[in-house]
Image (cartoon, rainbow, N blue to C red):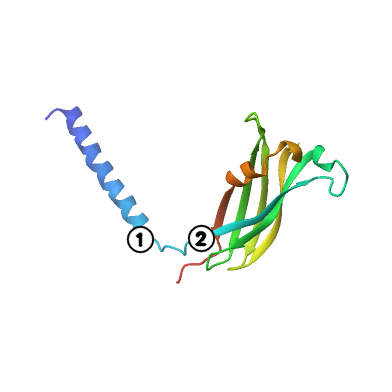
Amino acid sequence: MKPGSLCAALMGVMLMAMSSVFMAGCQSGVAGPSLAATVQAVTLQPTVVGLVGGENVCCCHIRGTVTNQSSVAVHAELLFPARGSDGRALGTGLVMEQDIQPGATRAFLAVGITAACRDVSLSQVVADKQIRLKGLWEPPA
């Protein structure tokens, strides 16, 4: 056997051994509870609330409530990307709600959309929303 092919064969065996060790390590972890949350009562809110014509002034916020449907407390990151009627990005409403207890509902105000509310489609914002959850759970000892 040539030295180059022997080295390649040895390298292949080493890679297979290392990958099986890594795979075994990943499969021995404890799975946590599933996480879920819903967003309700979403509305657009101008920066200048209560002012006639406020919907024509920058910037638009997203107001609503989020409910933790998990069996453990969660931190929730809510993102509401907004686009104009021409498809142009208008920013993303973002809010982070921490330590929402199981079954609890919390009001939120997401900021970050750089357009007036008259330029934002509520149905598009709600359809494109993203909810990222982090469970506050400790595996059993």
Instruction: Pick whichever, 20 or 27, lies toward us.
Output: 27
Q: Quadrant location of residue 28?
A: bottom left
Numbered label attached to residue 96: none
Residue 6 in the image, given as x and y percentages of width and height: 17, 33
Q: 10 Å neighbourhood of mark 2: few (<14), some, or many (≥20)?
A: some
Residue found at x 22% / y 33% = 8
Question: Vertical placement of 13 versus 27: above or below?
Answer: above
Q: How many marks?
A: 2
Determine contact: label 2, label 1, CB under 8 Å: no
Q: 10 Å neighbourhood of mark 1: few (<14), some, or many (≥20)?
A: few
Residue 48 visible somewhere in the drawing: yes
Element on which disc 1 rests: loop
Residue found at x 34% / y 57% = 27
Residue under label 1: 28
Residue 105 in the image, given as x and y percentages of width and height: 65, 64
Residue under label 2: 35
On the rendered structure, is 123 left or right of 54? left
Quarter in which the C terminus is drawn: bottom left
